[in-house]
Image (tube, rainbow, N blue to C red):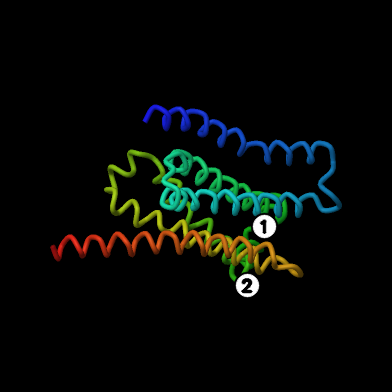
Amino acid sequence: MARGLKTQDWVRPAVYYGSLVPFVLLAVRAVTGSLGANPISEVLNQLGLLGLVFLIASLACTPLKIVFGWKWPIAVRRTLGLFAFFTILFHFFVYFFLDHQLAVAAVLRDIGERPFITLGFAALVLMVPLAVTSTKGSIKRLGAKRWRRLHKLAYVAGVLGVLHYFLRVKADASEPLMYGTVLAVLFLVRLFDWAQKRAAKRARAAT
């Protein structure tokens, strides 16, 4: 147990500070003027991809524990999930404030008429209650069972995020397909674990 605690003691801050690195690098690129001919589009793309990576990384934590028996991924799951939410929220703010310059009507039209923006916005909306209820106090208030059921929406948000990315790219769809494959594998691990636990419960009941 002591060894596990020591691992968590360094993994948690390592994941936190490591997650800040991409933002620092993006800020450096912005300050040095190396974001290319369309800096707003570059920032949007980088934040969107980074948010998806954080989201899938957070969804990978429980499957890693199931498959390998590691406990440390659970210790960083909340951190990764919050990074995913705030990165995607920042992605939307850049789109709203910089790309569309607070043109509410244009943004609403995009959400209603452009499928990839509709899916991305839906993913962000689904992640709001997950971020709000990410505290230990929320688990107590909702109850563990209801809290777990609510946080399964993270998989829905992940699927929407992958679809958003897939519809966004215009030529090579290999990268969004790769993320979609990873997400499918994670989902299958959770489904297999659920089926095993249900079978074991039925066996105990029958006994």
Label 2 neighbour load within 10 Å: few <14, some 14-19, many 20+? few
Q: Position of residue 132 (x, y in %)?
A: 42, 45
Q: How far is mark 2 from mark 1, CA to CA?
A: 15 Å
Q: Which mark is residue 63?
A: none
Residue located 44% across and 43% down the image: 70
Q: Is residue 47 above or below residue 118?
A: above
Which residue is depicted at the point 45% across and 48% down? 68
Of the two numbered discs 2 and 1 in the rendering, the one whose residue sits closer to the viewer: 2
Callout 2: SS: helix
N-terminal of the two: label 2 or label 1? 1
Residue 104, position as x, y percentages in the image: 62, 58
Viewer-nearest residue: 75 or 20: 75
158 over 61 or under it: above or below: below
Left or right, residue 159 beside residue 144: right
* Residue located at (40% from left, 63% from top): 191
Between residue 60 and residue 1, name the one nearer to us. 1
Pinpoint residue 194: horizontal percent, then vertical percent. 34, 61
Residue 47 placement (x, y as % from top left): 66, 49
Quarter of the image for the C terminus: give it. bottom left
The one of 39 and 65 positioned closer to us in this rendering: 65
Q: Which mark is residue 113?
A: 2
Quadrant in the picture for residue 22: top right
- Amino acid type at circle 2 is Glu
Residue 103 is tagged as 1
- Disc 1 secondary structure class: loop
- The residue shown at (32%, 44%) is 139
